[in-house]
Image (cartoon, rainbow, N blue to C red):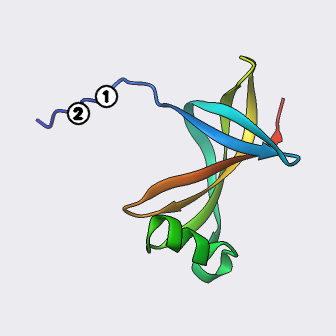
Amino acid sequence: MVFNPWAGVQRIVVFAGRVNNVTMDFTVIGDITEVETFAVGSSIRELPRLRRAYGSGKWRKRKGVARIRLSDGSICRAEIHWYEAHGIGRKEYKIKRFLD
């Protein structure tokens, strides 16, 4: 049996996102659903910057829906976008639109 210290622990991560060019801190509450990959590799305009900042890897631009807590304490559903690479993880979450 493999011991998983994170079993049953809810992930809560704080990110700085941009909505209408306004920086906003938010927390992802629970899991991200409806995850889709919509750009891979050279299709990503920011690829050279990502490689400089985080290292080389198979970079993907992804989107999904999550419940988020804004810095003022309100909770809502939002579509979020982020970059992800194997061995590096998810980076630079952004709020694209609010869903409720």
Q: Position of residue 82 (x, y in %)?
A: 62, 54
Above or below residue 61? Residue 93 is: above
* Residues at circles 2 and 1 in contact by the CB criterion of under 8 Å: yes
Q: Which residue is drawn at 51% across and 72% down?
A: 52
- The image quarter containing residue 50 is bottom right
- Work out how far the residue at label 2 is from the one at label 1, CA to CA, in angstroms: 6 Å
Above or below residue 28? Residue 9 is: above
Task: Using residue 75 as the reference point, say whether residue 34 is left or right of it.
Answer: left
Q: Position of residue 48 (x, y in %)?
A: 59, 78
Quarter of the image with the C terminus is top right
- Packing grade of label 1 (10 A; few <14, some 14-19, many >=20) is few
The residue furthest left is 1
Q: Which of 52 and 30 is in front in this view?
A: 52
Q: Where is residue 73 in the image (x, y as percent from the top left)?
A: 71, 17
Residue 7 marker: 1
Q: Which of 95 and 71 is in front in this view?
A: 71
Q: Which of 91 and 37 is in front in this view?
A: 91
- Packing grade of label 2 (10 A; few <14, some 14-19, many >=20) is few
Q: Residue at x 47, y 30 (%)?
A: 11
Quarter of the image with the N terminus is top left
Amino acid carrying mark 1 in the image:
Ala
Above or below residue 22? Residue 52 is: below
Secondary structure beneath label 1: loop
Q: Residue at x 61, y 52 (%)?
A: 92
Q: Where is residue 37 in the image (x, y as percent from the top left)?
A: 62, 63
Q: Which residue is drawn at 45% across and 55% down?
A: 89
Residue 39 marker: none
Task: Using residue 40 as the reference point, say whether residue 74 is left or right of it.
Answer: right
The residue furthest bottom is 42
User: Which residue does the numbered mark 2 point to in the structure image?
Assistant: 4
Amino acid carrying mark 2 in the image:
Asn
